[in-house]
Image (cartoon, rainbow, N blue to C red):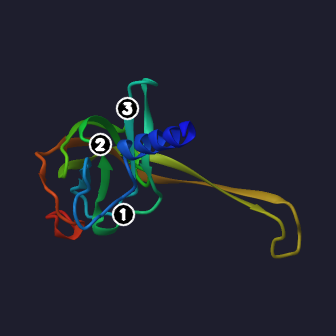
């Protein structure tokens, strides 16, 4: 019995923090949602972290190397105040942006993230090949190069919570 209670408590803790990109037909009980969207037409690979008061650091909530469908990311959180940090994995970002979000039960809090060009960065690339090559030689060789990429500053604004709607019905859905 004690083991079952411990597993149930652990399950509540995991559900209470956040969940991956979600789109239920209707809001779940004791759950609020945060929609992260950018005013950019480019496909963006999101990374979101939540500040954990116990550890005094940000913990991963969502990180994926492909853009979400509909052009924005929806995460489920327990109602309350959440300090979140947002960045993009497929852009050169000066530093992640932090935003305080008030999550309300059964509602969506939109967070608009803005990318502003902040100069150019030199990105070093390295391609490493191991094994046979065209002339049947075996070994290792590396090809090193560099590219220029636009560096971005991020800003984020948590908007007023709105009634729950599926992702496709949100005004910022693509």
N-term mark: 1 or 2? 1
42 sits to left or right of 139: left
Q: Mark 2 points at which residue?
A: 78
Quarter of the figure with residue 87? top left
> Is 37 located above or below residue 171 in the figure?
above
List x then y, in percent, for residue 158: 18, 43
N-term mark: 3 or 2? 3
Mark 3 surroundings: few (<14), some (14-19) or many (≥20) residues within 10 A? some
Secondary element at tag 1 = loop
Secondary element at tag 3 = strand
Viewer-proximal residue among 11 and 22: 11
Q: Classify the position of the C terminus by image quarter.
A: bottom left
Is the residue under label 2 in contact with that under label 3 (CB below 8 Å)?
A: no
Secondary element at tag 2 = loop
Viewer-proximal residue among 17 and 63: 17
Mark-to-mark CA distance, 3 and 1: 23 Å
List x then y, in percent, for residue 145: 60, 55
Mark-to-mark CA distance, 1 and 2: 22 Å
Residue depicted at 36% across the width and 63% down the height: 68
Residue depicted at 37% across the width and 46% down the height: 18
147 sits to left or right of 30: right
Mark-to-mark CA distance, 3 and 2: 14 Å
List x then y, in percent, for residue 115: 27, 49
> Is 112 located above or below residue 42 in the figure?
above
Residue depicted at 46% across the width and 25% down the height: 55
Image mark count: 3
List x then y, in percent, for residue 43: 34, 63
Disc number for residue 68: 1
Q: Name the residue under label 3.
A: 51
Q: Classify the position of the N terminus by image quarter.
A: top right
Observer-side mark, 1 or 2, equals: 2
Residue depicted at 37% across the width and 32% down the height: 51
């Amino acid at each position: 019995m004690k083991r079952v209670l411990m597993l149930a408590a652990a399950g509540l803790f995991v559900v209470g923090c956040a969940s991956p990109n979600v789109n239920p037909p209707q809001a779940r009980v004791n759950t609020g949602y945060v929609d992260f969207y950018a005013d950019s037409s480019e496909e963006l690979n999101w990374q979101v972290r939540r500040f954990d008061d116990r550890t005094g650091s940000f913990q991963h909530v969502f990180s994926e190397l492909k853009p979400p469908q509909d052009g924005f990311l929806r995460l489920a959180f327990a109602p309350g105040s959440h300090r979140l940090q947002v960045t993009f994995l497929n852009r050169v970002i000066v530093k992640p942006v932090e935003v305080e979000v008030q999550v309300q039960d059964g509602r969506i809090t939109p967070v608009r993230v803005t990318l502003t060009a902040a100069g150019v960065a030199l990105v070093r690339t390295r391609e490493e090949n191991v094994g046979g090559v065209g002339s049947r030689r075996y070994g290792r060789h590396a090809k090193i190069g560099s590219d220029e990429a636009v560096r971005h500053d991020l800003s984020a604004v948590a908007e007023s919570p709105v009634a729950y709607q599926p992702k496709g019905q949100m005004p910022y859905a693509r």
